[in-house]
Amino acid sequence: MLSRFSQHVHQNQLFSSRHNLLLALSGGVDSVVLAHLLKQGDFTFGIAHCNFQLRGKDSHADERFCKALAESLHVPFYSILFELKPYALKHKLSTQMAARNLRYEWFQEILKTKGYDFLLTAHHANDSIETMLLNLVRGTGIKGMKGIPEKNGRIIRPMLCFSKEEILKFAKAEKFAYRNDQSNRETKYDRNFIRLKVIPLLKQLNPSLENTLLANAQRFAEEGKLLNEYLELKKLELVKVSGDIISVDRNALLQSTSKHSLLHALLSPYGFNETQEMDLLQNLEKKGLVGKNLFSKTHQLSIDRTALLIRPLTAEEATHIEIHDLGEFLPKAGIHVQRVKKYNKVPASELFINLNKIVYPMIVRSPKRGDKFKPFGMKGFKLLSDFLKSEKMNTFQKESCLVLQNGNGDIVWVIGYRSDERYKIVGGETNLLKLVSEKRN
């Protein structure tokens, strides 16, 4: 088994003898065998054990066993005691998910502070098969049918080439001591139910179920790569990026014969779930949905007339900045000011104003309902909301738009778009101020 293990690690370039490895050790047969294989292969590694205190005295016995094993192998040992149930209750998580979050956060901390290159876990072929079946039941698509990835960032699972039966057989032949977790026999856990109830029934139909599913996983992985290549090409057709705003062509998406898969590929990286995707797709053609917003934990999606607009949830709250003198423009409002004596035609992102017409405090603020101004070049007033609409701004541009208000209440400048006709420069004026916004739209 050592020969196969070393060959597998080398051929797949998982790690080498120059790397410092951290092994997540539970005390069960899988991680114990991996510890011995690392030692026999002359790899440099340390051992980390989590005590979740779920099994009373047995949990503490597991920790003592792991510590003794580390000492016998002459490798560093790290352990931690978790208060799992309060954490799960506070964060509204299942016991299993809470345990996963806590242990991986702690493992990452050790990697960072102790100088380890990779974290090793002892997942094996049967674990990958169980994951495939769980994902099939939960409906994760083709990516969930690839099983457990062998390498994911700094996490490596070098035992996926071995079955549980092979591991047990090797442990027995080598007379390795290990701990048995009786909770692995409790079918209230989904994975245990798959392992103890579902797989034995499926093996009645196909005695070589494990080999069949592992072969399928390899095919699914290859097909997944082809699908990803196709999706990346479609993204080039559908997606435009401007700053931190992602725009998805709404009509092109709806015309696609693979719109559900496309939508999932486009939205899932931003944390939107399948329920949101299905609801969005079913209702996307309804005109009433224009302006509707969806939220993930990290992003906002807004349905515009011709596009789906996505941006991070880092948008500033309604802005209200008071400017009491020229020196406060740049540090407070991000607007550069310069005294000039001559007017030149400027782009929309810049403004010329006569200093004599400025009334302090000036205010840089978000638009309000009912705002009016007299757009440069026009004779009459116009609602700011109508002006923004006429500029064909998308939802996010409207939300991020700012105005510069004079101390007398006049809107002097829709920043980055249009100045006010009342403040235009006429011939002969020399006491001028030039304003340039850092935030150009």
Image (cartoon, rainbow, N blue to C red):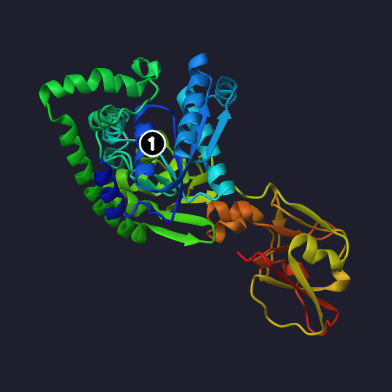
Query: Which residue is rendered at x = 28% and y = 23% of the image?
Result: 195
260 with respect to 152 (left or right): left
Query: Which residue is rendered at x = 63% and y = 54% of the image?
Result: 400
Front-most of residues 90 and 306: 90
The residue carrying pointer 1 sits among few (fewer than 14), some (14 to 19) or many (20 or more) residues within 10 Å by Cα, namely some
Residue type at tag 1: Glu
The number of callouts visible is 1
Front-most of residues 130 and 387: 130
Look at the picture and state if 381 lies above or below 74: below
Residue with the mark numbered 1: 274
Query: Which residue is rendered at x = 11% and y = 23% of the image?
Result: 205
**Tag 1 secondary structure:** helix
Spot occupied by residue 269 in the image (x, y as percentages of width and height):
43, 47
Spot occupied by residue 263 in the image (x, y as percentages of width and height):
36, 46
235 with respect to 395 (left or right): left
Q: For residue 169, which quarter of the picture?
A: top left
Look at the picture and state if 10 lies above or below 58: below
State whether residue 435 appears in this view. Answer: yes
State whether residue 56 appears in this view. Answer: no
Spot occupied by residue 160 in the image (x, y as percentages of width and height):
29, 40
Name the image quarter holding the N terminus. Answer: top left
Query: Which residue is rendered at x = 61% and y = 51% of the image?
Result: 399
Q: For residue 425, which quarter of the picture?
A: bottom right
Look at the picture and state if 350 lies above or below 252: below
Look at the picture and state if 245 lies above or below 202: below
Spot occupied by residue 392 in the image (x, y as percentages of width and height):
52, 59
Front-most of residues 428 and 30: 30
Name the image quarter holding the C terminus. Answer: bottom right
Front-most of residues 186 and 179: 179
